[in-house]
Image: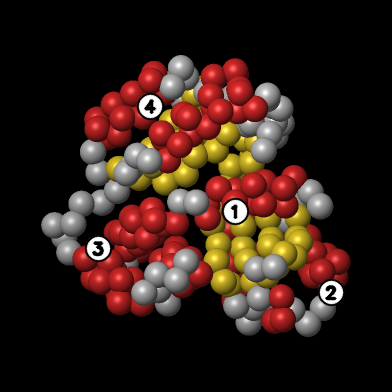
Amino acid sequence: MGRAFEFRKARKMKRWSAMAKTFTKIGKDIVMAVKEGGPNPETNSRLRAVIQNAKAANMPKDNVERAIKKATDKDTANFKEVLFEGYAPHGIAVVVETATDNNNRTVANVRAAFNKCNGNLGTSGSVIFMFDHTCNFRIKAEDLKIDLEEFELELIDFDVEEVFEDEDGILIYAPFEQFGAIQKYLEEQNLEILSSGFERIPTTTTKLSEEQQADVEKLLERLEEEDDVQNVYHSMEM
């Protein structure tokens, strides 16, 4: 298996321990999607993708509909996507994706997390080049009528980097810019998209001792506890 497979496996184990925050993240994604493209998923591909992710996370349908309705209220604040970059202890690069309605609060909280955990908040562009920005899709394995190798060839025009199967379905990884084109293709082929999203995969990783890993984990956990943080990526080998 390739780099995306190993990354996905490590992220999945991490995600299982933080499910309580999932609905909050999806709720913010719904607000941003509705504010950007309207409340109709038929004409708003971003909202359609978020609803698929909500279903995959077992978010109740009532919660989704309530979030969409709330997002259409002009008094509901929009969330701005803000990226932070820096270093954890032992030279581990860290990228933090946030969705915030108060940038000053978010900057202060993220900076405090880095400072208190012996990290360093960097400037824009300081570590982002160490990560590939990818999009991904998960589809039902039983929907596919051809084998994986043939399917991967079908996707070659979309610069797909990896296609592999795990217990949850078939995963497709491609460059970030190909998200819309791949989403359209899968829908045209009547392949049900179970979930989709974006991830930042480190181009190289650094192996640390258990003691050093604990130092880095302290910062990562502190960042992931922040309400405004959507995702945290790092270059530590898992």
Residue named by callout 3: 71
Residue occupying image coordinates x 40% and y 73%: 41
Q: Residues within 10 Å of mark 4 (few under 14, many from 20)?
A: many
Q: Is residue 40 visible?
A: no
How far, Cα to Cα, is label 1 from label 3?
29 Å
Q: Residues within 10 Å of mark 1 (few under 14, many from 20)?
A: few
What amino acid is at disc 2? Asp
What amino acid is at disc 3? Ala
The mark nearer the N terminus, 3 or 2, is 3
Pinpoint residue 1: horizontal percent, then vertical percent: 81, 52
How far, Cα to Cα, is label 1 from label 4?
23 Å
The mark nearer the N terminus, 2 or 4, is 4
Residue occupying image coordinates x 39% and y 56%: 20
Q: Residue furthest front?
A: 211
Q: Is 174 left, or right, of 63 in this rendering?
A: right
What amino acid is at disc 4? Ala
Pinpoint residue 45: horizontal percent, then vertical percent: 46, 67
Residue named by callout 4: 113
How far, Cα to Cα, is label 3 from label 4?
30 Å
As drawn, 131 above or below 121: below
Residue named by callout 2: 147
Q: Secondary structure at mark 4?
A: helix
Q: Is residue 108 visible?
A: yes
Pinpoint residue 76: horizontal percent, then vertical percent: 18, 57
The mark nearer the N terminus, 1 or 4, is 1
How far, Cα to Cα, is label 2 from label 4?
46 Å
What amino acid is at disc 1? Lys
